[in-house]
Amino acid sequence: IYEAITTNSLDSYSLSLLNPYMPNLSAAWLFQKAMSGQPYAKVSPDFINKLLSINFQCMQRLGEPVLRPFLQDVIQFEPLAKTLGLILLTNPGILPSIFIQVGFPMILEWMTHFAALGSYTFLSTFISPIL
């Protein structure tokens, strides 16, 4: 950071070199959005508690390899995909409230980060060892 300041490299591109794109962090913001109160959202007052309960029930059902990364605040593709899949199968009724709370455009944007997380995971798992 000191070098960026002293070389007057404070433009967006230069700063992005200090903090590269990390899809796991970009994917995490949807959870924060879903768990925060939105004045415009017309969801039930217990929506956030219900969503947390469903998430934890699904993660607990999937076991420690899924639950541990979440509790350590480390977003990983496989545990996240498994959790979302189980939520879709066991609690599809929560989806409309999530769309209302977060908004469809934000979910679409989040999906690009989720896909990037999957791509990064694939590359790290299968391509990186070859190199």
Image (cartoon, helix red, strand yellow):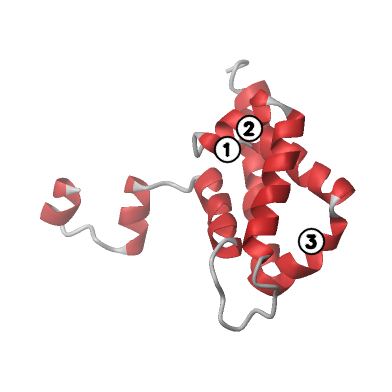
- Confirm whether residue 10 shows in the render: yes
Query: Which disc is residue 57 wearing?
Result: none
Relative to 76, is 51 above or below?
Answer: below
Residue named by callout 2? 67
Say how many tags the image has. 3
Disc 1 secondary structure class: helix
Q: Badges 3 and 2: C-beta atoms under 8 Å apart?
A: no
Labels 1 and 3: the sequence-earlier one: 1
Percent across and percent down for residue 115 are: 69, 48
Q: Nearer the viewer, residue 101 or 131?
A: 101
Q: Is residue 127 above or below residue 117?
A: above
Which residue bears the numbered disc 3?
Answer: 94
Q: Are marks 2 and 1 in contact (CB under 8 Å)?
A: yes
At label 1, the amino acid type is: Phe
Q: CA distance from mark 1 to mark 3?
A: 20 Å
> 121 or 90: nearer the eye?
90
Q: Horizontal and vertical percent for residue 52?
A: 64, 52
Query: Which image quarter holds the C terminus?
Result: top right
Q: Which residue is mark 1?
A: 70
Instruction: Identify the residue shown where x is 70% and y is 57%.
Output: 50
Q: Amino acid at mark 2?
A: Leu
Residue type at mark 3: give it. Ile
Outermost residue toward the left? 6
For residue 99, which quarter of the picture?
bottom right
Q: From mark 2 to mark 1, how far is it between C-alphas? A: 5 Å
Packing grade of label 1 (10 A; few <14, some 14-19, many >=20) is some
Among numbered discs 3 and 2, the one appearing first in the sequence = 2
From the viewer's perspective, is residue 118 above or below residue 19? above
Q: Position of residue 62 (x, y in %)?
A: 75, 30
